[in-house]
Amino acid sequence: MDNGQISLIESPENPRIKSQSEGYSAKEQELIHQLVQARLGKKNAIEFEPLEDYVVPPEVFFSQLKKPAVSIRANRMEFSTSSVRLFAGVRYVLPMLSERKQRMVVAICAEEELSSVEWARNKNGKWINRSITCPEYTQNIYQMMKWNQNCRYKAFGRLADSERGLVIVYDLAAAVMFDPLPEEYMDKRTGKMKKRIVKYYPDEIRMKLGRSYSDYEAIQRQSSFESLSGYIDTSGSAIPATISEEAAATLSEREQERKREEMLDTIIGIGES
């Protein structure tokens, strides 16, 4: 094999070698190109599929390992690692409850605030979550939601903007309930008895395929800003709200995006300090 042959094989600029690596020869690519141009010339439109008859499945039916969540027991609560990572570098947060909305919100706060809660700690350079013992507070949640005292509940969250900047909103009404004791079952593959934790979804989720597409889009538009009107902090004090829910729903998408960018810059600054 001479030097010319070696150069031909190894050169990444050789069109023949490049086209073969992409799966089509140069002639086949040209035919495809001509076909596309012909279809464009005839103005053949791609079929349109209306979405009004479709439903979007509940998010809890899928893996939520990387989604922010809070686990609540009768005497304590613990925010997931994914929650802590959203507010990386933040040690203290302000939890807030809305009985009417049946939601919990956590906002960034300073240690000096009256109702601040330490939700994470720095261990070997990494921020990890910590279990928060707060029986009086969790009992209020159980009473508000009419939950079973013997069971553990897990609520998933989403990031939103608010009067206090970025917050994580946890939907308590859609929380998943876990039995306190594992259930024994027979593994058909191995023939051995095993144990598993049984979980239960709220009826409005369990009995439905999901939300209609139009409802899903409406919720998406409204969920990027969470008005704190009606929320109370861990001391039972009402949170001063500077914007009503109606006004929050009418905020332009551009304004919401601007606010999110500003708050992200703030959080990044806190994490680096």
Image (tube, rainbow, N blue to C red):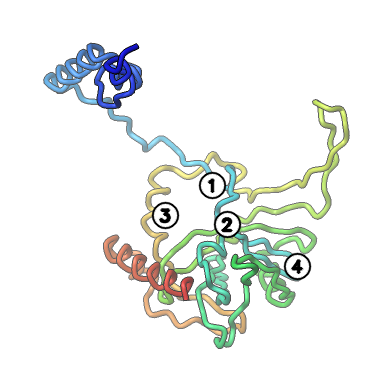
Taking 20 as reference, is 266 above or below it?
A: below
Q: Nearer the viewer, mark 3 or mark 2?
A: 2
Tell me the amino acid under the disc marked 2: Phe
Mark 3 to mark 2: distance in Å?
Answer: 16 Å
How many numbered circles does the render carry?
4
Q: Are marks 3 and 2 in contact (CB under 8 Å)?
A: no
Label 4, on which residue?
74
Label located before the other in sequence (3 or 1): 1
Tell me the amino acid under the disc marked 4: Ala
Q: Are marks 1 and 4 in contact (CB under 8 Å)?
A: no
Mark 4 to mark 2: distance in Å?
Answer: 18 Å
Mark 1 to mark 4: distance in Å?
Answer: 25 Å
Q: Dot 4: within a 10 Å radius of its alpha carbon, few (fewer than 14), some, or many (20 or more) residues?
A: many
Which mark is on residue 219?
3
- On the image, the x and y values in percent for residue 15 come to 24, 20
Label located before the other in sequence (4 or 3): 4
Which mark is on residue 59?
1
Label located before the other in sequence (1 or 4): 1
Q: Are marks 2 and 1 in contact (CB under 8 Å)?
A: yes
Q: Who is closer to the viewer here, 151 or 111?
A: 111
